[in-house]
Amino acid sequence: MLLNWIASLLILAASFSLLINRDWRWNLAALALQYLGAFWLVLASWPIAASAAKLITGWMACAALGLTLANTKSDPAAEKTWQEGGLFRLFTAALASLVAFILAAQLSTRLGIALPIAWGGLLLMTTGLLLIGVTVRPLQVILGLLTLLAGFEIIYAAIETSELVAAAQAVITLGLALTGAYMFLAAAGEEQAS
């Protein structure tokens, strides 16, 4: 149970980092930490092989995005300072974590799952929705979708142990990462052509 709380706090720190930072390197590192926390929370319900598959899939998505962004000439994170909306993003991250905790208490009693698992899943889902909602940058949108999906996977793993659905979620995670990588390569090709 203590490991679940530590994993939820790791997810909280990674979520704050995703919402506040704009450097793609730090964002991918935070995403990798989120997948590590998700691995520990899923491990409470699933065997280690299925949980490790989620971790490896998440890290493969991070690697695909990282390799693509490292090989493009343009920097998708032009805003590296924290002045433009940094305080707003910090406030929304704190508010999202509070709302996720309040909803997690209700969700854990209704679904019969542990509170740190419910909080970790809802925290990722609210962070993902915030990332999608407060930006138009393609990297942030892809990270938001991956974060939202990781949160759903945590809550789903505590309720159901279907390996077929877990495989479908892994395909969706890799598909999102590859779609994001293609978008960055296409944007870099357009910039070089003009």
Image (cartoon, helix red, strand yellow):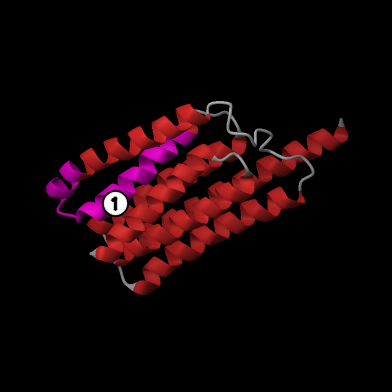
- The residue shown at (37%, 48%) is 151
- The residue shown at (41%, 39%) is 127
- Which quadrant is home to the C terminus? top right
Residue in front for this viewpoint, 41 or 16 = 16
184 lies left or right of 3 = right
**What is the count of numbered marks?**
1
Picture coordinates of residue 86, whole percent (x, y): 52, 31
Q: Is 50 drawn above or below residue 19 in the view shown?
A: below
Residue at the disc numbered 1: 155
78 lies left or right of 118 = right
112 lies left or right of 191 = left
Q: Per the image, is 33 magenta?
A: no
* Main SS class of the magenta portion in the image: helix
Whether residue 170 is visible, yes or no, is no
Picture coordinates of residue 184, whole percent (x, y): 69, 42
Q: Which amino acid type is shown beneath numbered disc 1?
A: Ile
- Which quadrant is home to the N terminus? bottom left
Whether residue 38 is visible, yes or no, is yes
Q: Quadrant of residue 54?
A: bottom left
Picture coordinates of residue 130, whole percent (x, y): 43, 33
Residue in front for this viewpoint, 85 or 154 = 85
Residue stretch in magenta: 105-131
Q: Residues within 10 Å of mark 1 (few under 14, many from 20)?
A: many
Picture coordinates of residue 76, whole percent (x, y): 68, 38
- The residue shown at (48%, 51%) is 172
Q: Is 55 drawn above or below residue 190 in the view shown?
A: below
Q: Secondary structure at mark 1?
A: helix
- The residue shown at (45%, 63%) is 55
Q: Per the image, is 118 magenta?
A: yes
